[in-house]
Amino acid sequence: NLFKEINQILNNKCIKVNENWINEIKLFIEKNNIKNVNDFVFSQYLNSDLYEIGISCLPMNICQWNNKILQGIYILQIDEFVLVAESK
């Protein structure tokens, strides 16, 4: 089953996405007869917006944490960064 294969590819890389995204990728692969499913799925993931396809992976109460270290693998999307060494 292609859905399970795509899900396994993502799980192997600790990537969590919603089922709608997997279904859309599955349909595209089937329609366009994509041969290298692994590379295609990962490249599509890298070009996607995690706000649209992702599932929250951080602990719900992380904002209240103080001096704790996350254990495990977390994939985050950086929207903006500030160079603190430069003056504004």
Image (cartoon, rainbow, N blue to C red):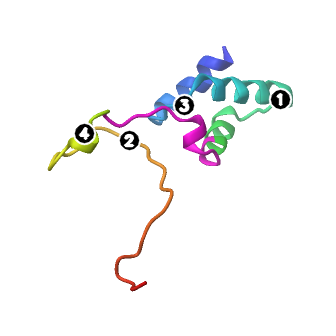
Looking at the image, do the residues carrying marks 1 and 3 touch, with CB atoms under 8 Å apart?
Answer: no
Q: Position of residue 21 (x, y in %)?
A: 65, 29
Which residue appears at 32% of the width and 33% of the height? 60
Left or right, 37 with reference to 29:
left
Q: Which mark is residue 17?
A: 3
Q: Is residue 88 left or right of residue 38?
A: left
Q: Secondary structure at mark 2?
A: loop
Q: Residue at x 24, y 39 (%)?
A: 71
Residue at mark 4 to residue at mark 2: CA–CA distance: 9 Å
Mark seen at residue 50: none
Where, quadrant-wise, is the C terminus in this rendering? bottom left
Q: Which residue is mark 2?
A: 74
Q: Residue furthest bottom?
A: 87
Residue at 56% from the left image edge and 24% from the top image edge: 7
Q: Quadrant of the N terminus?
A: top right
Q: Which residues are magenta?
A: 45-59
The residue under label 1 is 33
